[in-house]
Image: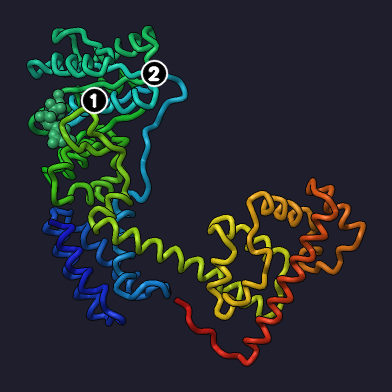
Amino acid sequence: GLADKLQDTFKRLRGRGKLSETDVSEALREVRMALLEADVNFKVVKDFVSRVKERAIGQEVMDSLTPGQQVVKIVYDELAALMGGTQSRLNISSRPPTVIMLVGLQGAGKTTTAGKLANLLQRQNKRPLLVAADVYRPAAIKQLQVLGQQLDIPVFTLGDQESPVTIAQKSIDQANALLRDVVIIDTAGRLHINEELMQELRLIKGQAKPHEILLVVDAMTGQDAVGVAEAFNGQLGLDGVILTKLDGDARGGAALSIKAVTGCPIKFAGMGEKLDALEPFYPDRMASRILGMGDVLGLIEKAQASLDLDKARELEKKLRKDSFTFDDFLEQLQQVRKLGSMEQILSMIPGMGSQLKQLKNAELDEKDLKRTEAIIRSMTKKERQDPALINGSRRKRIASGSGTKVQDVNRLLKQFEETRKMMKRFQLMQKSGRKPKGFN
Ligand code: GDP
Ligand code: MG
């Protein structure tokens, strides 16, 4: 499948120390082939490859990754972006009931998905009402009623003699009467898109005024699914897509193309026939699944570490210029919060690891951090730049402004002075202008 092909390509890339433009082009040619074979839309593939190429050639510097790994990271980023980047949630109306209308061709999985979605929402403490608005397919109403029974969720029906438009309209009153806060309308499909179907759906839309029109499409149908999504979106306007039978689709073409082609995000994925087999769709997770989960997560961690390394470098520059101020100190503290320890940042600066042991106060607990932050925030801009200004009366003011004691302020000033001294020592060490080394 797609995953195997891409992983093979990347295995070859990853081992390399340096990548030539030819290496990158060669790898991307394989990526292109793999995507086309996975039934990804041709134009999507073309744009995708050119975006990856552009980024791979003007590569951001990330010392922690080899060039091969960086290409994999770029492909991962772009795959996730292709599918919308971040999770797209349902629009839940502030005025209940939220009305969700499921549309799609026959056999796509609408009725099953109506049950699954009701189940998912019920687990999030919503009170769904299922609405049987497919009056054409024999036993369609019964199918929904069975699902409702299994889930203990009411199903609204007026039999198969009323029009779907009337059913949809009356279901909203019923929801209000039963205090149900989400209405899920299961509509009829056809084998192919036709005007009759679209006309009916437009009328239901006009009556029920859904907050969400979700297209249910079968992932196994690949590019056809994309065509269906384009047509429904054009005729009806879609708020999102539910991709069913992703459990059986080894190619992934529909998942990769739909957002890029139609602009509609995939909101959920059907992963099986059972009622609990519906998942929110996460573009980043799908991308890592395609590329091989563990590997990619490791890479992302490394890339993150390299972002922190950039910060460390910035700090180092300041140390060299001896322009370290309380503002920098504050920023370091925020990093510490994020990373867990100041050591982690400082240890990235060459020569700092051993110096660090002399900084006895490196282990601050969360409460200390909060207090320190409050104190620094109570200093004026000038005081932060030039702590020598902070005399007795200023110390009192800072203490009361930050809800601390003067002793706390004194302690911090002393700590800052020590840090500065240590940095001076460090600076002397590096004074010869030697290029720092060992960034890895
Ligand atoms: P509708 O005509 O659009 O209402 O489609 P149905 O809900 O009746 O589903 C058609 C078939 O697809 C049924 O056999 C379902 O069990 C099956 N189905 C629906 N969703 C999924 C899914 O996510 N995975 C799998 N494997 N089967 C599914
Ligand atoms: Mg159905």
Place residue 191 in its image quadrant: top left
- Badge 2: how crowded within 10 Å, few (<14), some, or many (20+)? some
Distance CA(mark 2)–CA(mark 1):
15 Å
Q: The disc labelled 2 sits on which kind of residue?
A: Asp
- Identified at 14% across, 10% down, the residue is 160
Left or right of residue 297: residue 4: left
Q: Which residue is mark 1?
A: 114
Q: Is mark 1 within 8 Å of ligand 1?
A: yes
**Picture disc at residue 181:** 2
Percent of width and height locating residue 127 = 36, 18
The x and y percentages for residue 181 are 39, 18
Q: Secondary structure at mark 2?
A: loop
- Mark 2 vs 1, N-terminal side: 1
Vertical side of 214 occupied by 9: above or below: below
Q: In the rendering, at what x and y percent does residue 74 appear?
A: 33, 65
Compare residues 435 and 20 and report the one nearer the observer.
435
Residue drawn at 36 percent across, 41 percent down: 88
Q: Tell me where residue 236 appears, x and y as whole percent.
A: 26, 32
